[in-house]
Amino acid sequence: MRLAEHCRERLATIRAADRFRRRRVIEGAHGPEVVADGRRCINFCSNDYLGLAADPTLSRRLAAAAGDVGTGSAASQLVTGHNAEHAALEAELAEWVGRERALVFATGYAANVGVVSALMGKRDHIVADALNHASLIDGARLSGAAKHVYAHADAGAADAALQACEGGNRLLVTDSVFSMDGDTAPLAALAASAQARDAWHAVDDAHGLGVFGPAGAGRVAEEGLGSDRVPLLLATLGKSVGAAGAFVAGDDDVIEAILQSARSLIFSTAPPPALAAAAHAGVASARTGDDRRRHLHGLIARFRRGAAELDLPLETSDSPIQPLVLGAEARALTLSDALLARGYLVGAIRPPTVAPGTSRLRVTLTAGHSAAQVDGLLAALSDAIHDGAARRRSPARESA
């Protein structure tokens, strides 16, 4: 079979399962209001939690830095790609999350894959939450370590899995806030288990950084977990920070060992130094962004109250991620399209991103949204759901 024919058959299977995905073209800035495929709409499927992705402070810093240091780093970090802008960003990140040192990667995926595979090997054991991000799963696979998956957010099951591991090093790894469900791992209990079982503990705080904790330092900081309890703290710079990239933070020797071993860092060109400068500005804004955080948490509470009044079955979440689980792929797509027709962009999340039978709308709130926009989304959801129910009861619909 020719490759093109194989791909056509594969695409037909994806389409038949309502799992085909299409990139939307966004014109202009990525903020709470966007022009998507030529249509202006209010964006409720962004991870820009503090509303910094289009903040003029960051864009001015990016432009100024590009004038000074250019647009590319020209080499990997261990050759000549490590610029003073990268070093300044790493120092700021380490101070923010209360660690001795931080190391910047080009993407969150590169950070998670690189850190896990750098530290774990074939004689080791990785104990992981069932709903961990794909990058953590892939890092575990690449490491060659034995993998032990525990039931989602079940600290007792994690402890039992750690206890059952024999020989080698043990790594307990979890997201802090889970990207598709919006709930939070039992971080303190997991840290206690890791410490009691002589295991290392890694937390990806990508969706917690900037949103929770003192000065927005994340869920790990909110729980008061230092490097003795969470020696590997990972997070991204493309969500609350409003820029791009990611980092791992920890004790100096731990970070140096990762720098010397992580293939996704060693064999990648370093991120552009001007982008590091913009991320540095984003970190400064996030650290001092208590007003933004208060506004965001107010919107989260407002949305959940409104959803309860409309009897919308939201999952339990105090984060900006508010999932409305619908079940079938077709139902999620239909409701997403109905919202877009009303001027609201909310993505339909389907397998393999989530488990079969749990397709959903993933509503994400940001500090850039207004109360009126949240109220408008709730009204549009109610209208779209009721309109869809009426069509399903229609004889013409049933015979179609």
Image: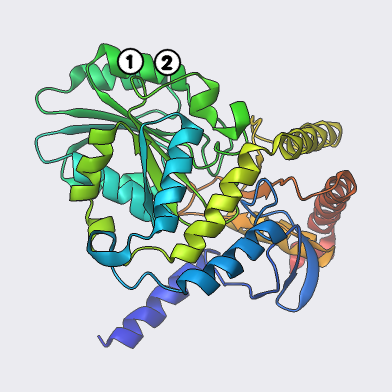
Inspect the image, locate mark 2, and give the three-letter code of the amino acid beneath it.
Ala
- Tell me the tag on residue 399: none
Question: Is there a contact, CB below 8 Å, between mark 2 and mark 1?
Answer: yes
Q: Position of residue 115 (x, y in %)?
A: 28, 44
* Disc 2/disc 1 C-alpha distance (Å): 6 Å
| Crowding near the residue tagged with mark 2, few <14, some 14–19, many ≥20 C-alpha atoms within 10 Å | some
- Comparing 62 with 178, the one in front is 62
- Residue closer to the observer: 363 or 115: 115
Left or right: residue 240 versus residue 387 is: left
Say whether residue 50 is left or right of residue 299.
left
- Asked whether residue 284 is in view, the answer is yes
Which of the two residues, 24 or 84, is positioned nearer the viewer here?
A: 84
Q: Position of residue 145 (x, y in %)?
A: 17, 39
Q: Which mark is residue 193?
A: 1
Residue appearing at x 61%, y 38% in the figure: 287
Name the residue located 18 percent from the left edge and 39 percent from the top edge.
Answer: 120
Instruction: Tell me the SS state at disc 2.
Output: helix
Res 189 label: 2
Other residues around mark 1 within 10 Å, as few (<14) / some (14–19) / many (≥20):
many
Which of 74 and 117 lies nearest the eye of the viewer?
74
Q: On the picture, is 157 further left or further right than 256? A: right
Residue at point 51%, 50% (across, down): 237
Q: Position of residue 259 (x, y in %)?
A: 24, 48
